[in-house]
Image (spheres, helix red, strand yellow):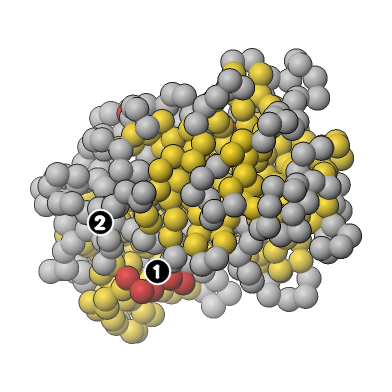
Amino acid sequence: MALSFAQTPSSTLEPYRPSFHFSPRQGWLNDPNGLVYYKGEYHLFFQYHPDSTVWGPMHWGHAVSKNLLHWEELPIALYPDDLGTIFSGSAVIDWQNTAGFGKEAMVAIFTHNVPGLQQQSIAYSTDKGRSWTKYEGNPVLPPPNRALRDFRDPKVFWYGSQAEGHWVMAVAAGSSILFFTSPDLKTWESSGGFGLQGATCGVWETPDLFELKLDNSAESRWVLTVGIGGCAPAGGSGQQYFVGQFDGQTFTNENDKKQVLWADYGADFYAGQSWSDVESRRIWIGWMNNWAYAQALPTGIFRGSMNLPRELSLRQTPEGIRLVQNPIKELESLRTQLRHWENLQISEGQNLLEGISGESFEIRLEFQVDPLIDKITLNLRVGDKTKTTLGYSMKARKLFFGRAESGLTEFHKDFSLNHMADLAPQEDGTIKLNIILDKASVEIFANDGLVVMSEQIFPIEGANELELFAQGGSLTLKSLSVYALEGF
Ligand code: FRU
């Protein structure tokens, strides 16, 4: 039975219930798990504690969507059992029935956790993910040695052609990723490891590994993404990635060992995972949260939501190859255009967005960088003494975000810290910002997705105004569009 999923009962009852980002009806949510597309449905499983709004014995919650925006929450897919609670993992469609679970079985690969022991297990469904059977031979992959206590979050995919290929599993182990291969999802052999590179100041978690085209050319690279429990640019947990090659057995980094690449410079993108079995695009989603304060969010009967799904690509930049993320094109279906300007001069102190108010917007702007002026500032959810501030500092060439005055902030001391990211102008000297605002979040995609910042906010009721200012001089905007986003 599907639970009806009312995302917007009333903004006064649940002011922080997102309207087009997924959140569970009630209880605690963390990582996205088991992302797979099958027969017109995007499946989103998630780390779930149904009985409380803090982390506890993990289950896999479940939701499905046809457009990645409007989600229907289904009953819990996987419950804890004798082997432990159900930690993060992935899902695939076993097109060739390699495991023998049935035609086109959906197979979930997850970590069974008990204190001190993490091992990989599988479960399957032959009814589009509605009911699940755990494999009687679990676990399928115990840790290579009992001293390895962090051995979790298996990401599985098929490598190679149908006839010649094999399954690959990437598992997080301390500050490394271990790789295994299998013909049938049940028996796994070690095939290599990668680690102690990039950022290693926290435990590595939730790996993903996929191939992406470079600038839509014939050339491609493999991208290994890794959640890291601490020391991310905005503090706390964050998402790093490596660019290189994967030969079916193991991954090699093409950059210097010490180079650290971050997928998100905001505080709230973690445990990113991409969907299996989506044709011709790679889409991923993260847990829109940070372990630093996740258990203290002031949201009510649910705690935790997902980021907006993003389409991934690779771009050659003067600094090297970088991961690029843009909101899924489906988001356009929620838009109503409110304003559009081109080549508009704004003088200092003039608020171009005066009179526009609301909770959910997409704001797209492009401007010429002018080092003679200080900055361009956008204030969101502005109310009596409250606002969320973002903008671009022309001299420092930095994107900045501040939520110290954004509304409820006192639930954790780190929530008020300011966040920044280096952002060079594009070749033509312009900066592009695409800002997606839902009831309790701001996601910023700069220069067509080259630099991204994801941030939660908890504004005071009625703080609904927008402001856009040039500071330290007047500025020409190449273009500015404001859309209202109509959620569910
Ligand atoms: C990441 C994580 C995973 C683990 C899960 C437990 O946020 O710590 O490594 O499987 O959460 O809920």
The answer to whether residue 139 is left or right of residue 341 is: right
Could you tell me residue 89's position as x and y percent? Answer: 61, 40
Q: Residue at x 33, y 27 (%)?
A: 52
Quadrant location of residue 72? Answer: bottom left
Q: Residue furthest bottom?
A: 342
**Helix or strand or loop: what does disc 2 sit on?**
strand
Identify the residue under disc 2: 380
Identify the residue under disc 1: 331
Could you tell me residue 136's position as x and y percent? Answer: 68, 31
Q: Residue at x 37, y 32 (%)?
A: 50
The answer to whether residue 315 is left or right of residue 46 is: right
**Helix or strand or loop: what does disc 1 sit on?**
helix
Of badges 1 and 2, the one in the foreground is: 1
Tag 1–tag 2 contact (CB < 8 Å): no
Q: Residue at x 50, y 54 (%)?
A: 43
356 or 395, which lies in front? 356
Q: Amino acid at mark 1?
A: Leu
Question: Is residue 13 shown above or below 148?
Answer: below
Judge: label 1 CB < 8 Å from ligand 1: no
The answer to whether residue 41 is left or right of residue 145 is: left
**What quarter of the picture does the C terminus occupy?**
bottom left
268 or 9, which lies in front? 9
Can residue 382 be seen in this snapshot? no
Judge: label 2 CB < 8 Å from ligand 1: no
Question: Is residue 157 shown above or below 186?
Answer: below
Q: Amino acid at mark 2?
A: Leu
153 or 296, which lies in front? 153
